[in-house]
Image (cartoon, coloured by chain):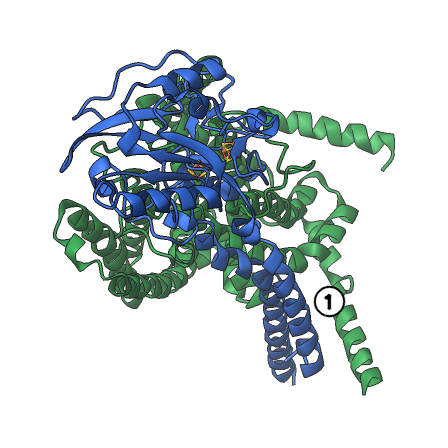
């Protein structure tokens, strides 16, 4: 690229930075106010210490920013690894139209939730310690999760970057990054498997503190399986909302396939939920915690696993069988609530349950949590309005595609090797 | 299938190597319990609840003077300004005092949870917190079965507060400030193994006086601080459901499976992808014909 092109790209980006669309919409106003309030709260947090704004205590060290934004939010970002798995590995082309949006959503989720993690760190200026230097706590689950976050963010970025190149018009870069996709997707799925379950593994050593109905040595597996339908439920909701919000710019293929996509996702969700539910039942029988069922904690537990796991599972099934989009959407919302309940039960409500206090977050914590989500949505919208996330790729991409696909080449080579080997 | 047998075996081989390498990864120096750790023996039957140890500790570390005093019905807890607490319980043998602080586990949950090695089990035995490493994530607090690391929530530059068995004093050949000051002989400093001998002897010599249990000998895999009392420890507010497995063990299955997943999972996905591709090609060829 010569300097002329550079200034061209720069000018283009500066031009694009300007907001598009109406500014004073209710959503913008509410999110704007929340974000401003959050900034004030964060100033207090950094001058007076965490205790001045969050409810964390010596008995329940993690507040909402970790327990909700990180531990719960990351489960919802799981949609990306499931959808990329279906499209790139299983070759299910029908999900192709939602790949970019899901990957973008996940990328932003990880960026903003990692940010939330920074807010909650008592000594964030030391955050570099586990990344470079000689302070590697390799026996720590959190160490593993932190590294996987970073690597996975990189993978998601590479998966999404071709969209950016199409926006700016960087043909050569696009070709290069597209050729990385399959490898990065595979790497990303492995990383996701591990850090989704790793978030559960963070609580393995808290055995004496978490209520026995929620604690089991299988938490990591349960976290992993639930991240599948958590992520997909969120994709269903995202699809539903985006079909309205970005109606004008959505490609026709996508609009047409919307119903088909949502219903197929519902089927996958139903299967994943039933696997999850049967695992929960097995774990429960294995743990022999029958006595706890007949107590307030037991009822609360039943509310979670029947009301917000089993019932959405049935609704997904039913909605899929009867091609009922509304039911599927209701099921998705319920499944999402169920995951929020589950993660917060483990990390907040049933944590140190034998103490007499149940920990509720302060309003300031909630405002910041919401602000994090709002900012994520705002950035998401900013990008979708500009880059070809939902719209068709620019025409030059189609010509590009006709140039020999790189995969064919390796395939030929592999065949040659086979011949040589024999 | 895209992956033939030879490739498959190769992948298995790599996985095997990483698996065995993984054994060294994920354990916090397992064999350490065989080493001679330093420890403290606390004998509740000798303690008079004078709080001298609390004051000595506060002075040693520049913390404010302890507040409150041991009384039945009141449970004082360690916190970010107080690393030791002495409490008083009404037990089956009358009022008894009991001291609480970090137990310096043989295989500490806090150190294994720490992603920066700020919490460190030293070779000498004390578990110490290191300011220059800690990023304040509070995983150690989540993991410690005794809820001992405390966080300064009200400071912009917060520290983790917990007993460090006066590591620096020990290294100079001294003993912890609390042991030094205790005039009643309720605290004894020494090698953990010797302390267990002492505790056993005391029980043996006065079997009526003691509850025949050394708390910390086996709990959570053994702790550096050992307790003797006249009544079951449950009556003194201790938990008796913590088990005898060391807590980092709960993580091991997960951590061991990490290298395996990182190797086998991508190999499997690649294979899956290849077979799907081939099927697709076949279908499109058939269509073309
Ligand atoms: S008692 Fe808690 S803080 Fe002390 S060494 Fe054991 S795990 Fe760590
Ligand atoms: S708060 Fe500090 S000492 Fe505790 S686990 Fe985190 S980094 Fe380690």
Q: Is residue B61 visible?
A: no
Assign a secondary structure to mark 1. helix
Q: Nearer the viewer, residue A257 or A208?
A: A208
Q: Nearer the viewer, residue A252 or A32?
A: A32
Q: Residue furthest toward the front? A: B205
Q: Residue furthest toward the right? A: A2
Query: Chain A's shade in the image?
Result: green
Query: Chain B's shade in the image?
Result: blue
**Residue B96, horizontal then vertical, whole percent:** 21, 30
Residue depicted at 20% across the width and 24% down the height? B74
Residue depicted at 38% across the width and 50% down the height? B218
**Residue A27, horizontal then vertical, whole percent:** 38, 28
Location of the N terminus of chain B by quadrant is bottom right
Location of the C terminus of chain B by quadrant is bottom right
**Residue B222, horizontal then vertical, whole percent:** 42, 47
**Residue A120, horizontal then vertical, whole percent:** 46, 28
| Residue placed under numbered mark 1 in the picture | A407
Residue depicted at 52% across the width and 66% down the height? A92
């Amino acid at each position: 690229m010569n300097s002329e092109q550079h200034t061209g790209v720069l000018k283009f980006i500066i031009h694009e930075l300007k907001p598009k669309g109406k500014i004073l919409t209710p959503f913008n106003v509410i999110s704007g106010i929340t974000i401003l309030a959050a900034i004030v709260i964060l100033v207090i947090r950094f001058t007076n210490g965490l205790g001045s704004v969050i409810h964390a205590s010596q008995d329940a060290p993690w507040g909402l920013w970790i327990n909700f934004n990180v531990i719960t939010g990351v489960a919802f970002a799981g949609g990306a690894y499931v959808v990329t798995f279906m499209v790139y590995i299983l070759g299910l082309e029908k999900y192709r139209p939602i790949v970019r949006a899901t990957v973008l959503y996940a990328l932003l989720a990880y960026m903003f939730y990692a940010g939330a993690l920074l807010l909650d760190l008592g000594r964030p200026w030391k955050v570099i310690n586990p990344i470079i230097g000689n302070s590697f706590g390799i026996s720590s689950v959190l160490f593993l999760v932190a590294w996987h976050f970073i690597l996975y963010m990189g993978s998601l970025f590479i998966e999404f970057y071709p969209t950016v190149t199409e926006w700016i018009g960087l043909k050569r870069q696009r070709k290069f990054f597209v050729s990385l996709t399959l490898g990065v997707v595979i790497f990303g799925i492995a990383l996701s498997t591990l850090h989704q379950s790793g978030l559960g593994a963070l609580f393995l050593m808290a055995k004496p503190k978490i209520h026995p109905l929620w604690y089991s040595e299988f938490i990591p597996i349960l976290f992993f399986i639930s991240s599948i339908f958590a992520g997909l439920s969120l994709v269903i909701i995202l699809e539903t909302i985006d079909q309205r919000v970005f109606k004008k710019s959505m490609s026709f293929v996508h609009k047409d396939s919307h119903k088909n996509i949502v219903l197929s996702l519902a089927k996958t969700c139903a299967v994943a939920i039933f696997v999850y539910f049967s695992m929960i039942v097995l774990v429960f029988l294995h743990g022999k915690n029958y006595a706890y069922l007949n107590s307030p904690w037991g009822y609360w537990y039943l509310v979670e696993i029947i009301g917000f796991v089993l019932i959405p599972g049935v609704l997904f099934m039913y909605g899929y069988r009867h091609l009922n989009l509304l039911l599927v959407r209701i099921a998705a919302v319920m499944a999402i609530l169920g995951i929020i309940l589950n993660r917060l039960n483990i990390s907040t409500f049933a944590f140190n349950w034998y103490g007499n206090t149940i920990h509720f977050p302060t309003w300031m914590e909630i405002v910041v949590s919401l602000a994090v989500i709002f900012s994520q949505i705002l950035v998401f919208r900013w990008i979708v309005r500009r880059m070809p996330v939902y719209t068709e790729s620019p025409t030059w991409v189609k010509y590009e595609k006709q140039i020999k696909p790189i995969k064919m080449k390796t395939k030929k080579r592999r065949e040659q090797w086979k011949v040589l080997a024999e | 299938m895209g992956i033939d047998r030879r490739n498959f075996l190769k992948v298995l081989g790599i996985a095997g190597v990483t698996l065995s390498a993984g054994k060294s990864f994920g354990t916090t120096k397992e064999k350490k319990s065989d080493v001679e750790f330093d420890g403290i023996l606390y004998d509740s039957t000798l303690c008079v609840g004078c709080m001298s140890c609390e004051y000595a500790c506060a002075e040693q570390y520049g913390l404010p003077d302890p507040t409150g005093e041991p009384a039945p019905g009141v449970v004082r807890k360690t916190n970010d300004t107080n690393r030791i607490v002495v409490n008083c319980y009404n037990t089956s043998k009358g009022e008894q005092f009991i001291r609480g602080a970090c137990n310096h586990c043989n295989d500490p949950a806090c150190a294994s949870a720490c992603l920066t090695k700020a919490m460190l089990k030293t070779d000498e035995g004390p578990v110490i917190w290191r300011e220059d490493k800690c990023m304040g994530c509070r995983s150690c607090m989540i993991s410690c079965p005794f809820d001992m690391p405390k966080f300064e929530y009200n400071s912009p530059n917060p520290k983790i507060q917990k007993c460090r068995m006066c590591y620096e004093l020990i290294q100079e050949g001294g003993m912890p400030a609390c042991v030094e000051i205790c005039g009643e002989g309720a605290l004894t400093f020494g090698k953990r193994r010797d302390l267990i001998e002492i505790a056993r002897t005391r029980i043996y010599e006065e079997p009526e006086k003691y509850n025949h249990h050394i708390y910390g000998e086996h709990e959570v895999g053994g702790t550096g601080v050992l307790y003797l009392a006249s009544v079951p420890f449950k009556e003194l507010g201790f938990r008796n459901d913590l088990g005898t497995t060391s807590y980092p063990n709960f993580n091991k299955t997960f951590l061991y499976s990490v290298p395996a997943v990182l190797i086998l999972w991508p190999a499997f996905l690649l294979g899956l992808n290849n077979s799907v591709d081939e099927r697709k090609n076949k279908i499109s060829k058939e269509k073309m014909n």
